[in-house]
Amino acid sequence: FSRQLRLVDIHEFQTKLEPLELKEFQTCCMKHIDAARDKLIKRWLSEIQHIFYKGHKQKQIPSEHEADQLAAFYNCAANLMTSQLQSLGLLSMDDYTDLLVQPPTSARAYEHSGFILRFVLDDDRIKFEPNFDDFETVFLNIYDVMLKVICAIPRIETKLYSAYEGETLLKPCILPEILAAHKSKVSEVVKQEGDGPLKHLKQFDKYKFIISKQADNDIDTFLQEEHTFDEYARELRKFKQFAEQIQFKSVRSLRLGMFQVHCDDLIRALTKRTEAICERILTRMMDDWATRSS
């Protein structure tokens, strides 16, 4: 197969301009791996099979009556094929790691267009979607899938002899410490790059009493008490200002390291929650006004 073949085509990600959803990235990687597997099975293996058929016709391959020589011959072929698969696996893993972990020789800020990370209001807290564990799990799983593919390629004998009963698969070896080193680099970069979003999250600390629903509890108490119209109006203005500040002064999207942080969902949810508080106060004001006017 071509020396340029990789299990994951990182050039597709390098040329993208828009940030990626994690699911989109995962799906794209799996398509690349499936396409590479098809090339190995349908093209590479078929071409080797054709060469062996041709060699057999020209009596360049030991006959089935020369069992030891035939076995040695195919073991040599298996070693060559295994070496190619190992090289494919190692180069693919190197390239994939360089996609996620910026290589020191790169002139670019990042080798990819970024990954979308959303801030989402979840009851009384803010959560990340996807969270950092999700990113790490997806990124690391690609290594396992690549390894699984190169270890599932059959020996050429299985294609040549219907009655073949020996070992059926080639056995490329990617040392566990090599795989672990790749995964460790990616895990570390996810951890480091997560600092930016975590720091940006502090921008919403000023609304913590709204996020935690303490504001709802305070308004429950406030509305159970008797207040003047001006006191209600003052409280209403306060929460209207919060709603406007959240809606119009919050940063909706920004690039922080490898992540493109989207805050739209959070901003909408906080605005809606704050406006609901305003609505409750306004309803109470109208009810009190109606009572006093009757």
Image: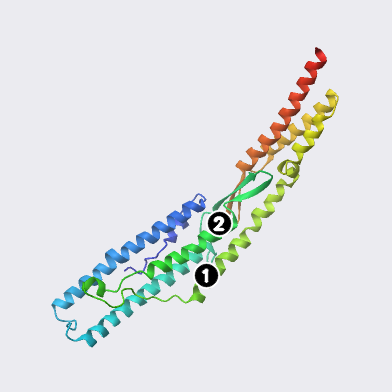
Crowdedness near tag 1: few (<14), some (14–19) or many (≥20) residues, C-alpha within 10 Å: some
Quadrant of the drawing holding the N terminus: bottom left
Q: Secondary structure at mark 1?
A: helix
Numbered circle sitting on residue 134: 2
- On the image, the x and y values in percent for residue 120 come to 62, 45
Residue 8, located in which quarter of the rendered image? bottom left
Say left or right for 91 vs 284.
Answer: left
- On the image, the x and y values in percent for residue 29 come to 43, 58
CB under 8 Å between callouts 1 and 2?
A: no
* Residue displayed at 63% across by 58% down: 194
Is residue 241 placed above or below 181 in the rendered structure? above
Crowdedness near tag 2: few (<14), some (14–19) or many (≥20) residues, C-alpha within 10 Å: few
Front residue of this view, candidates 102 and 212: 212
1 vs 2, front mark: 2
Is residue 267 placed above or below 72 in the rendered structure? above
Is residue 202 placed above or below 61 in the rendered structure? above
Amino acid type at mark 2:
Asp
| Residue 263 appears in view | yes
- On the image, the x and y values in percent for residue 22 come to 51, 53
Amino acid type at mark 1:
His
Quadrant of the drawing holding the C terminus: top right
Q: What whole-number distance in Å separates the C-alpha atoms at marks 1 and 2? A: 18 Å
Q: Secondary structure at mark 2?
A: helix
Say left or right for 161 vs 21.
Answer: left
Front residue of this view, candidates 29 and 14: 29
Is residue 170 placed above or below 28 in the rendered structure? below
Task: Identify the residue position indicated by label 1 in the image.
Answer: 182
